[in-house]
Amino acid sequence: MQHSAITAGAHPFPHSHLLGLSSLKPWEMVFLMDEAEQWVTRNRSAEKHDHRLSGLTQINAFFENSTRTLLSFEIAGKRLGADVVNLGVAGSSVKKGETLLDTALTLNAMHPDVIVIRHGSSGAVQLIAEKVDCPVLNAGDGRHEHPTQALLDALTIRRRKGRIAGLTVAICGDILHSRVARSNFQILASLGASVRVVAPPTLLPANVEQLGVEVFTDMDAGLRGADVVMMLRLQTERMDGAYVPSTREYFRFFGLTEARLRNAAPDVLVMHPGPMNRGVEIESSIADDIVRSAVTEQVEMGVAVRMACLDVLTRKRRGVDFSSPLPASREGSGEGRSSLLPSLSREGQGVGDSVVANPNPAARP
């Protein structure tokens, strides 16, 4: 069954790049999630390799240190048969003074077929995408977006809960510095979930209520009745001041403990994009609970989602069309939700350091 919001003959994913989720329609997000399902099954089999990207070159250009995301993209590309080349910041000419524009032109001169980019500045991936002749996939830029992380989070929730629409999702922790939170606001709201943010005032963006989320500065209240609790890492490397008195004090008031989790729904799903700081954001007993915690499943879904994105973005170069029937929709269309949010204004935030959803101001408890 075709998604109700797609007219007959419409393209399921007409984009050349995946730079963020703010520009995607709800059914385009669902399309990528549905495409990932086949790779979940394939990755659990003895024969994990598929050679559809054979002969194509994938460059992973990471200008920020990364282990988990880089490894996930590398495995995804290799399982699809691509020639994968990793460019780490330590060995980059950027360290020698090369501009981002020069780097983009250099990469383009090597005729890659797809480039995966992580960068510390919001908008940097967009700039590179404008200068190269191949698809570009955003692996995280500044405080802006991290689209594949949000897609894998949504896929994890859908597989565990059977749906996204109608669920209450509490995203807790360092909202201010989190591109993961911003991308999750986009996809979860678009697919019909009710999204809460729970954090101390110092870790909330200014005017965060305008993002269509319900805001809580009390952890117990924010978790009450939540179907999904997503904890975020304290990003101390992005902090230029004292946002919390200490990690010990932070855990006392905003760490996820067994006692606090009892406020959530009985069948609550606990998530964390990683890496986790045990005893700071979450108790080990919760993180390691195979019934409630989906942390390792998120890692698994990450490889499948990135395989799907690499496959979809390179189809035009491979001469593959989208003429096959579109996947059946599993979520509502999200019509009526805006994908254009006003920028958040907090000193130090870069251009695009906000995402948007349907305004739904909520009083802070």
Image (spheres, rainbow, N blue to C red):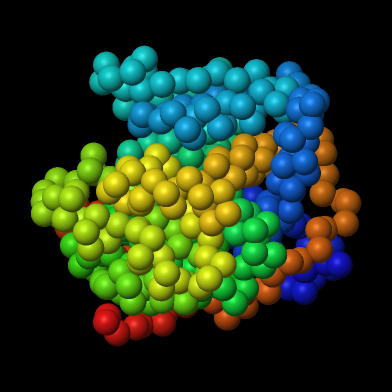
Residue 281 position, x and y percent, is 32, 51
Instruction: Using the image, determine if residue 142 lies above or below residue 310.
Output: below
Q: Which of the pair 128/79 is nearer the observer?
A: 79
Q: Is residue 228 left or right of residue 95?
A: right
At 45% across and 71% down in the image, what residue appears? 264
How many numbered circles are shown? 0
Quadrant showing the N terminus: bottom right
At 22% across and 59% down in the image, what residue appears? 252
At 74% across and 40% down in the image, what residue appears? 39
Residue 265 position, x and y percent, is 51, 72
Q: Which of the pair 199/351 is nearer the observer?
A: 199
Residue 206 position, x and y percent, is 24, 68
At 48% across and 54% down in the image, what residue appears? 271
Instruction: Using the image, determine if residue 27 lies above or below residue 19.
Output: below
Can you see residue 270? yes
Quadrant showing the C terminus: bottom left
| Quarter-of-image position of residue 8 | bottom right
| Quarter-of-image position of residue 215 | bottom left
| Quarter-of-image position of residue 25 | bottom right
Can you see residue 14? no
Q: Which of the pair 49/44 is nearer the observer?
A: 44
Residue 263 position, x and y percent, is 41, 73
Q: Which of the pair 168/75 is nearer the observer?
A: 168
Q: Is residue 308 left or right of residue 24?
A: right
